[in-house]
Amino acid sequence: MSQEKQSFFRYENGILFVLFLVFGLVFMDRLSIIYLFPFVAPELGLNNTQMGMIVGATSIAWGFSTLLFASLSDFLGKKKKTLIVFILIFSAATFTSGLVGGLGSLILVRLLMGASEGPVIPLVQSSIMAESTPKRRGFNMGFIQSSGPLLGNAIAPVLVVAIAAATNWRYSFFALAIPGVILAIILMFYMREPLLHSSGKSGEKQEKPTFSEYKSVFKTRNVWVGMLIAIFYMMYLLVFTSFMPLFLSGVSGYSEAQYGIVLGVLGIAMFFWQLFIPFLSDKVGRKAVITPVTFIAIFLPLAIANFHSNFALLAISVFILAIGFGGQPLYLAIIPSESVPRTFAATAIAVIVLTGEIIGGTLGPIVAGVLADKYSLYAPLWLASGAALIFFLLSFALKETAPVKVSGDKETSMNEVNVNI
């Protein structure tokens, strides 16, 4: 092993940290509107159904652009330039979110944000996979994924609510636009184009992928099972995170500071579990951890519904039961990317995100909003729990891909051919 690889300051760790910040910023920008709903809704005159529409509109654009531009980047092999362009676009969309004057303009801006943020996820994950040593692949991809809850669910609610309470909710969006520009500049000078072939060497010309190879991605068992899981997981994720703040402020009557603390606990818990569970899967296998953590996911919305009146018990329950989110990096990124040739890792991740966003991420918040208006804010929690039950059952259909469970020869072949039925 070379000295460069032995050093902590090697490129693998450096780009891991930068892409960690990029990935987390995407979710800070996307989820901040949810935390600001108690500020935005009264000023713009929005009801629960309309707030669900705003979240759903972002999901629609996010999903379609994810597959379109991730697949394009796989064929062109220009992940660095594509990533930088989209970071700049979604930063502009974030800034513009603070300028809207009504429902129509807000939906248009969120459509632009979804279209520009969607491709970032598969671009980041496929890039870090290409730069990861096999024994650290799960940890690295989980570390990247964990930035979403840390920055998007823990830091973002505290930050944007504090800015909104001190000034105006519009300034929260203005502030969030700045880091994106800074990170885009850093990537221009630091990031190198990822090598898409497992046997590729620096400076070596890479063969262009074929359309036949591209089509084979969609025949891969773990990809289409992941698509089904993503539908119900995204419904679970977006319904729960969209309506939990409204439930805590509306039904529980918590102050902005109190529900901000609970959301912060959720974000820290999601960060920890999305870091620990993929790391554990590197040691014991992907399948060994997916089943128990997806089962636990069923009980988090139920805990909110039943323990919301006891602040301390609520916070403890949220931290423990958030382990259900720990499987997200596995079935949304790690397993699909390990199941196809590395060249098409971005496409495999993107098609799963597309399906989840378009169906689960779009219909879930809208249906939850309608149910909340017709019945109560308890209804979205029951909907989220039902979605978790379904993706728990679907997790049994996934096939193992972890290098620790797959022999060296088999692991190599998995990067050349699909893991089919």
Image (cartoon, rainbow, N blue to C red):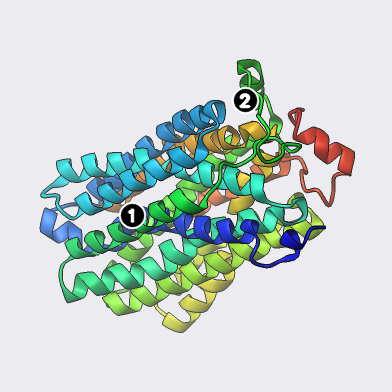
Q: Does residue 326 appear to the left or right of 166 in the view shown?
A: right
Query: Which residue shows up at 47% across the image and 77% down it?
Result: 315
Quadrant of the snapshot with the N terminus: bottom right
Task: Compare marks 2 and 1 and give the one earlier in the sequence.
Answer: 1
Task: Decide: is 326 above or below 214.
Answer: below
2 or 291, nearer to the observer: 2
- Name which residue type carries label 2: Phe
Q: Which of the two discs, 2 and 1, sits closer to the camera? A: 1
Query: Where's residue 402, x and y in %?
Result: 77, 48
Query: Which residue shows up at 46% across the image and 52% down it?
Result: 189
Q: Can residue 205 be seen in this view?
A: yes
Query: Where's residue 201, x and y in %?
Result: 71, 39
Query: Which residue shows up at 69% across the image and 28% down it?
Result: 220
Q: Does residue 278 appear to the left or right of 84 in the view shown?
A: right
- Name which residue type carries label 1: Val
205 or 184, nearer to the observer: 205
Q: Is residue 325 visible?
A: no
Q: Does residue 244 appear to the left or right of 229 in the view shown?
A: left
Judging from the image, what secondary structure is the residue with disc 2 in?
loop
Judging from the image, what secondary structure is the residue with disc 1 in?
helix
Q: Residue 218 carries which label?
A: 2
Task: Decide: is 369 above or below 281.
Answer: above
Q: Residue 25 carries which label?
A: none
341 or 274, nearer to the observer: 341
Q: In which quarter of the image is residue 263?
A: bottom left
Where is mark 1, residue-wise?
181
Task: Decide: is 372 above or below 130.
Answer: below
